[in-house]
Amino acid sequence: MLSLRPLKQFSIPFTGLKIGKHQFDFEIDNSFFDAYDYSLVKKGELKVEVELDKQETMLILQFQINGTIVMDCDKCLAEFNAPISIHERQIVKFAEDDLESDDLEIIMLNKKESELDIADLIYEFITVGVPYIKICEQNGDGQKCDQEMIAKLESFAVGSHSEEEEKQDEDPRWSALKKLK
């Protein structure tokens, strides 16, 4: 998923932490999304707050992700800033050997591990938070779709020509044949 692993700043070393809650803050910019090939999101500025609750046998992570991502409008193709606010929880349990968990909210981690890489989790939360239909006008910041582009796209749409345009483009020989009906 990652191209080169330039996201080492998104690792949380948890072995030296005392039992209890700890706060971690991260900044996300375009370089974060550049690290992922074929990313749905290419640009954005987000703040990630992670509350890590360290317990004897597990870690409970609370993610709060706020900011804006740059999206392409599905209607007029213009770029626009879409606000995003995500709150997610992730549980990390420790095991003797690498076990797979059936629960998507639980990550199994070997007891020998000393840090947790959360870059993929953050990327996944942001990607899942992207709206399925992205339209400027539904964004909420007052931006309107580019009417000039919509008019141009409609002019290229199949069946969008008016009857007058069809009559102008019509060959006069066909109109003579139509009169024979």
Image (cartoon, rainbow, N blue to C red):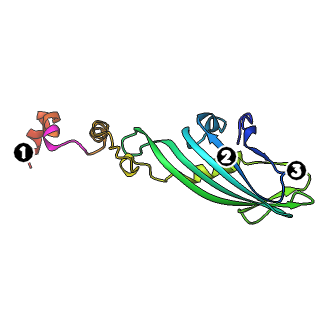
Q: How many other residues sit within 10 Å of disc 1, few (<14), some (14-19) or many (≥20)?
A: few
Q: Tell me which label, 3 or 2, sits earlier in the chain.
A: 2
Question: What amino acid type should be assigned to the residue bearing mark 2?
Answer: Asp
Q: Which of label 3 and label 2 is nearer to you?
A: 2
Cα separation between marks 2 and 1? 77 Å
Between the residue at mark 3 and the residue at mark 2, the CA separation in whole angstroms equals 22 Å
Q: Quarter of the image containing the N terminus? A: top right
Picture layout, residue 130 above or below residue 174 = below
Membership of 163 in magenta stretch: yes
State the residue in front, 20 or 139: 20
Proximity of marks 3 and 1: CB atoms separated by less than 8 Å: no
Secondary structure category for the residue under label 3: loop
Q: List the residue tagged with mark 2.
A: 25
Question: What amino acid is labelled 1 in the image?
Answer: Lys
Q: Amino acid at mark 3?
A: Glu
Find residue 179 and name its label. 1
Task: Check if residue 180 falls in the magenta segment.
Answer: no
Q: Which residues are magenta?
A: 160-165
At label 3, counting other C-alpha atoms closer than 10 Å, the crowd grade (few under 14, some 14-19, many 20 or more) is: few
- The residue where tag 3 is placed is 113
Q: Position of residue 54 (x, y in %)?
A: 80, 59
Residue drawn at point x = 51 percent, y = 44 percent: 68
At 60% from the left and 58% from the top, the residue drawn is: 87
Q: Earlier in the sequence, mark 2 or mark 1?
A: 2
